Image (tube, rainbow, N blue to C red):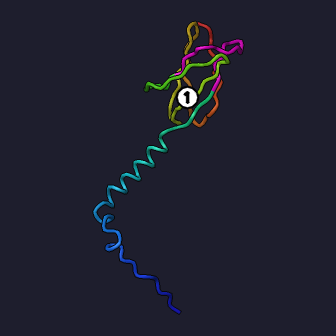
């Protein structure tokens, strides 16, 4: 028994694909790359050596202008790629670098200067 498939004439039905196939494929490729490199939302808390929350501590993504500050509870939220490094600092404390990796929730303890 032989199954007959319909005869599609892609050249007649989709002539724009012949001329635009490569640009369309490149667009899809770069769109996928952009989505995967975007990163994740990292949430966290910054505390002092006694475990008390640090208000207005600065969190910045190394090598970019992206940044955030902590609220009254010492909490923050920042958009960062998996390969990124966060720089956490506060007046009177020693700054700390934290690699994001696959962490979505980070608690950072800063030591007094």
Tell whether 37 sits left or right of 70. left
What percent of the width, then of the height, locates residue 62?
47, 25
Q: At 54% from the left edge and 17% from the top edge, which residue is drawn? A: 58
Instruction: Name the quadrant containing residue 40.
Output: top right
> Foreground: 17 or 113?
17
Please give the name of the residue rendered at 67% of the width and 18% of the height, measured from the top-left corner: 73
Give the residue displayed 47% in from the left and 41% down from the top. Answer: 37
Farthest residue toward the bottom?
1
Question: In the rendered image, which residue does mark 1 sit on?
Answer: 78
In the displayed structure image, the side of residue 110 where residue 63 appears, left or right: left
* Label 1 crowd bin: few (<14), some (14–19), many (20+), radius 10 Å: some
Which of the 4 image quarters holds residue 51? top right
63 to 91, vertically: above or below? below
Q: Is residue 16 above or below residue 83?
A: below
In the displayed structure, would residue 11 be above or below residue 49?
A: below
56 or 37, which is in the foreground? 56
Question: Which of the pair 82/78 is nearer the observer?
Answer: 78
**Residue 80 on the magenta span:** no
Residue extending farthest left:
19
Q: What percent of the width, then of the height, locates residue 27?
A: 37, 51
**Residue 11 position within the rendered picture, expressed as x and y whole percent measured from the top left:** 32, 73
Residue sitting at 39 percent across and 78 percent down?
Answer: 8
x, y (%) of residue 100? 56, 31
The residues colored magenta run 44-59
Is 7 on the left or on the right of 22, as rendered?
right
């Amino acid at each position: 028994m032989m199954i007959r498939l319909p005869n599609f004439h892609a050249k007649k039905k989709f002539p724009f694909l012949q001329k635009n196939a490569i640009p369309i494929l490149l667009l899809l490729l770069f769109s996928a790359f952009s989505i995967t490199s975007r990163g994740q939302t990292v949430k966290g808390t910054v505390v002092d050596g006694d475990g008390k929350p640090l208000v207005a501590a600065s969190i910045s993504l190394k090598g970019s202008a992206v940044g955030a500050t902590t609220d009254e509870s010492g909490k923050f939220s920042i958009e960062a790629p998996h390969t990124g490094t966060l720089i956490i600092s506060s007046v009177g404390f020693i700054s700390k670098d934290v690699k994001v990796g696959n962490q979505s929730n980070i608690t950072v303890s800063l030591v007094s200067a």
